[in-house]
Image (cartoon, rainbow, N blue to C red):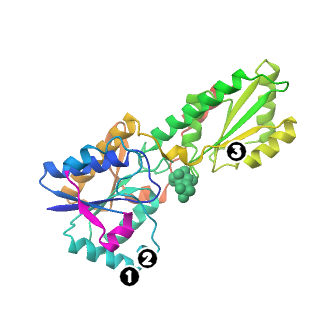
């Protein structure tokens, strides 16, 4: 193998650049050149790519987002698009492809693989919803950002005392997975957390907050995962049950920016190196995951078809800590 390609696809995630860097360096020590494909599969079909030097990637480890950019393409989902992608890969001497992204990106990788291009997926999404890995690139940074934001809400909430207790409702990302919500609720000292994986009852939640107020608490912070209920819907219900005017915030895309944490940079590096090793071993249609601290070879179909859910331990922890 003389040349491999790397691309980022789907929602960007902090730490993707550290992963690109690791791919380029691991390839280099094996005398393989890495070509960076810009704008995901769109760039692959259009031949939008250039060789990445180790000098260039040395300066990107702390950058958020993805220097290769990401894109969505309808054409790539067609036979014509897949043929174009393989033609461009051949034309540019790409003998193996590393795809950093989420389940949709892995599906695309498996589709192009059918045309004879070996592929390895690396999980990159803040949602941490990809099965087969304990962590995906970007999730730790998102949790840190949310935790920091919850602390900021505590700062103002504990300072301004008004006649009635105040409730701060904070909506966080994660699609159908409550990882960001549950982890940051624990780390940020929230009073309640709603996740898509667990049934919830707003009346019960309000009774819980009311008990806290009766015990002297003057405010409460509730974290709600976007996949469970919209914060504005929740606010309507909370306002009517508690007869208050709750404060609602949607943290939105700030959760996907910011310098990647050391942990994200580290696991991104582990997975980048492992992906190159798998290609060199002749593997294809595989995904790299982090299991018990190690980068391991996983079934990409598990990453595509199954979803990570928050663990029972995290649910239990949350129940203890909100009490
Ligand atoms: O999958 C990552 C993610 O940030 C989700 O948490 C969120 O629901 C979605 O992407 C937002 O997508 P967009 O950037 O298209 O609004």
Percent position of residue 246, x then y: 78, 37
The region drawn magenta spans: 39-53
Name the N-terminal-most of marks 2 and 1.
2
Q: Which residue is mark 2?
A: 75
When asked about the image quadrant of residue 157, the answer is top right
Q: Residue at x 41, y 45 (%)?
A: 64
Query: In the rendered image, is residue 66 in sight?
Result: yes
Label 3 close to label 1 by CB (< 8 Å): no
Q: CA distance from mark 2 to mark 1?
A: 7 Å
Helix, strand or loop under label 3: loop
The quarter of the image that holds ligand 1 is bottom right
Is tag 2's residue or tag 3's residue first in the polypeptide sequence?
A: 2
User: Looking at the rendered structure, which numbered label has been put on residue 142?
Assistant: none
Q: In the picture shown, does residue 120 fall above or below 137?
A: below
Give the residue displayed 61% in from the left and 43% down from the top.
251
- Residue 47 belongs to the span the image colors magenta: yes
* Label 1: how many Cα within 10 Å (few below 14, some 14–19, many 20+): few
Is the shortest distance between ligand 1 and the CB of mark 3 under 8 Å?
Answer: no
Which numbered tag is attached to residue 80?
1
């Amino acid at each position: 193998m003389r040349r491999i390609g790397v691309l980022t696809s789907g929602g960007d995630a902090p730490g993707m650049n550290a992963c690109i860097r690791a791919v380029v360096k691991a390839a280099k020590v094996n005398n393989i050149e890495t070509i960076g494909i810009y704008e995901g599969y769109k760039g692959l079909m259009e031949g939008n790519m250039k060789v990445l030097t180790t000098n260039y990637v040395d300066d990107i480890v702390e950058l958020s987002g993805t220097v290769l950019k990401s894109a969505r393409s309808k054409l790539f989902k067609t036979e014509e698009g897949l043929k174009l992608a393989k033609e461009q890969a051949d034309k540019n001497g790409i003998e193996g492809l590393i795809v950093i992204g989420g389940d949709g990106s892995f599906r695309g990788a498996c589709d192009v693989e059918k045309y004879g291009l070996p592929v390895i997926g690396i999980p990159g999404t803040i949602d941490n919803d990809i099965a087969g890995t304990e962590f995906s690139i970007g999730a730790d940074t998102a949790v840190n950002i949310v935790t920091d934001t919850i602390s900021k809400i505590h700062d103002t909430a504990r300072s301004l005392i008004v006649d009635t207790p105040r409730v701060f409702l904070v909506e966080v990302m994660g699609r159908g997975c409550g990882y960001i919500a549950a982890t940051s609720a624990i780390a940020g000292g929230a009073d309640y957390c709603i996740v898509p994986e667990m049934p919830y009852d707003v009346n019960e939640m309000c009774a819980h907050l009311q008990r806290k107020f009766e015990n002297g608490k003057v405010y409460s912070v509730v974290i709600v995962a976007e996949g469970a209920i919209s914060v504005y819907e929740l606010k309507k219900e909370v306002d009517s049950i508690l007869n208050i005017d709750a404060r609602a915030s949607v943290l939105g895309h700030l959760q996907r920016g910011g310098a990647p944490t050391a942990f994200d940079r580290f696991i991104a590096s582990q997975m980048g190196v492992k992906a190159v090793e798998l290609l060199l071993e002749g593997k294809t249609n595989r995904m790299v995951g982090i299991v018990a601290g190690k980068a391991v070879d996983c079934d990409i179909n598990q990453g595509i078809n199954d979803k990570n859910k928050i663990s029972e331990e995290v649910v239990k922890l949350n129940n203890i800590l909100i009490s």
